[in-house]
Image: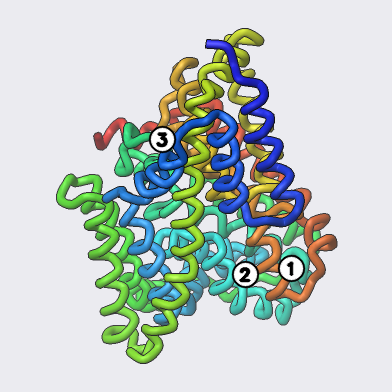
Amino acid sequence: MSLNVGAITILFGLFFLLMVLRVSIAFSMGVAALVTLMYLKVPLAVVFQGMISGTNSFTFLAVPFFIIGGELMTAGGISRRLIDFSNSLVGWMRGGLAHVNIVASMFFGGISGSAAADTASLGSILIPMMKEQGYDGEFSTCVTISSSVQGMLIPPSHNMVMYAVAAGGGVSISSLFLAGFAPGIILGIALMIYGYFTAIKKNYPVGDKFNLKKAIKSGASAIVGLMTVVIVVLGVVGGIVTATESAAIAAVYAFIVAVFIYKEMPIREYYKVVTRTAKTLSVIMILIATSYSFGWVVTYLGIPKALTNAILSLTTNKYLILFIVNILLVILGMVMSMGSILLILTPILVPIMTAIGVDPVHFGIIMILNLGMGLLTPPVGAVLFIGSGISGIKVDKLSKAMIPFYFVMFGVLLLITYIPALSMTIPNLLK
C-alpha cells in the first residue's frame, strides 16, 4: 500500500503548526486527526468512537487510583518520615544531604510514582535544608529533580500503566513493575556516586555518625507508608489482584495512613486532594482520548509499517537502531510532554522493537527513563520548572547546572538499553 503523502502532510503539519501556536497537545492531536479524516472522507464518527475506546479501559482505571494514592501520601506526612529514615541510612557520608535526597526520592517514588510530586514534596524541604548547610543552590536543586526520575521507574508508576495501555494490552503491567526496580536503583546509585565526588571537590559537609537505634526508629515510622509499595507489587505480581484493583486498595490504604495513622491530614483536606487529582486526571483523560484517535489515523495511513520498513532498510543492527530511537526520544522529550509521547509513539515504536528482538517490557523501561530525562530539559520540562520555582533559580541557569547530571543519566540510559538483564532478570525470575 502506497503512503498518502497529502494526508500525512496534513496530519503532522497541522499538529506541529498548532503546537507552535501554543495550542495544547491534546487539542492539537484531536484537530489534526479530525481534519485529516475529513480530507480522507472517512466518517467522522471514527474520531469520537476512537476517543471513547481510548478511555474505555479497565486497566486505565489504575491511573487515577495511583495518582490519588500518591497525593494522599504526599499530604499525609510521609515526606518528612522518609527524609528522616534516609538521613539515618546515608546522612553520615560526605555530602550526606545529597545522598539523603536521592534515597528519599527512591522511597518516595515507590509511593507516588510521580517525578513532579517527588520534587514538589521533598524539594520544598530538602532544597532549603541543603542551602542552610552550605550546599550550592544549583547543586541542591539538580540533585532533587534528577533523583525524582526514579519515581517513574520504581513501582507503582502510572506511566508504566499508560505505556502498557498504549502498547495495545500485550505488555504485562506486573512485568513492567518488576523490570523497573533495578534501573531505578542503578540510577540512584549513579547519582550518589556523582554526588559523592562533587561533595569532595566542593567540600560539602558530612552528617552525623551512623546510629543504629535512630535508623530502626525512623524506619519503623516510615515503614507504614512504604507498605503501599508492598501492597501494589505483591498483589499484582502474585496474581492476587489486577493492577487496577491493587491501585484502588493502595488508595484506600493511603487514606487510612494519612488520616488515621499519621494523623497529619484532616479529613476536610481530602476535598483538596481529590480536586488536585481530578485536575491531573482530566488532562490525562483528554490526552488519551485524542491521542487514540490520532493513533488510529496514523495506523490507517500505514505509517508504523512504513517507518519500520524504512528503519530496517537503513540498518538491521539492533544496537544502532536502539541508539537512533533513544536520540529521537531525547529530542522529542525536550519539546513534548511525557504522556503525549508515550501515547503517540508507543504504538509506532513497539513493532520496530519487536522486529529487532527487543522485549516490549525492556523497551518500556528504556522509554520511561528516556522521557523522564525530558522532564528535566527546557523548554517544556515540567519538573525543571518546579525545581526552579522552589529554589528561585532561573531556568536557564538551572539548565546549565544540570549538564553533568544529563551525562550521568544518559550513561545509565545506555546501560539499561544495552544490558537487557538489568531490567529483565527480576521479571524473568519471578514470572
Residue at 69% from the left image edge and 61% from the top image edge:
384
Residue 106 visible to the viewer:
no
- Are there few (<14), some (14-19), or many (20+) residues within 10 Å of tag 1? many
Report the amino acid beneath label 1: Tyr
Residue at 37% from the left image edge and 84% from the top image edge:
270
Q: Are marks 3 and 1 in contact (CB under 8 Å)?
A: no
On the picture, is 230 further left or further right than 410? left
Residue 294 visible to the viewer:
yes
Alpha carbon separation for disc pair 2 and 3 = 39 Å
User: Residue farthest to the left?
Assistant: 240
Alpha carbon separation for disc pair 1 and 2 = 9 Å
Q: Mark 3 points at which residue?
A: 167
On the picture, is 131 further left or further right than 418? right
Report the amino acid beneath label 3: Ala
Going from the N terminus, do you reach mark 3 or mark 1 first?
A: 3
Q: Name the residue under label 1.
A: 204
The image position of residue 225, as x and y in percent, is: 34, 71
The image position of residue 287, as x and y in percent, is: 51, 52
Alpha carbon separation for disc pair 3 and 1 = 45 Å
The secondary structure type at the circle numbered 1 is loop
Going from the N terminus, do you reach mark 1 or mark 2 first?
A: 2
The image position of residue 381, as x and y in percent, is: 68, 56
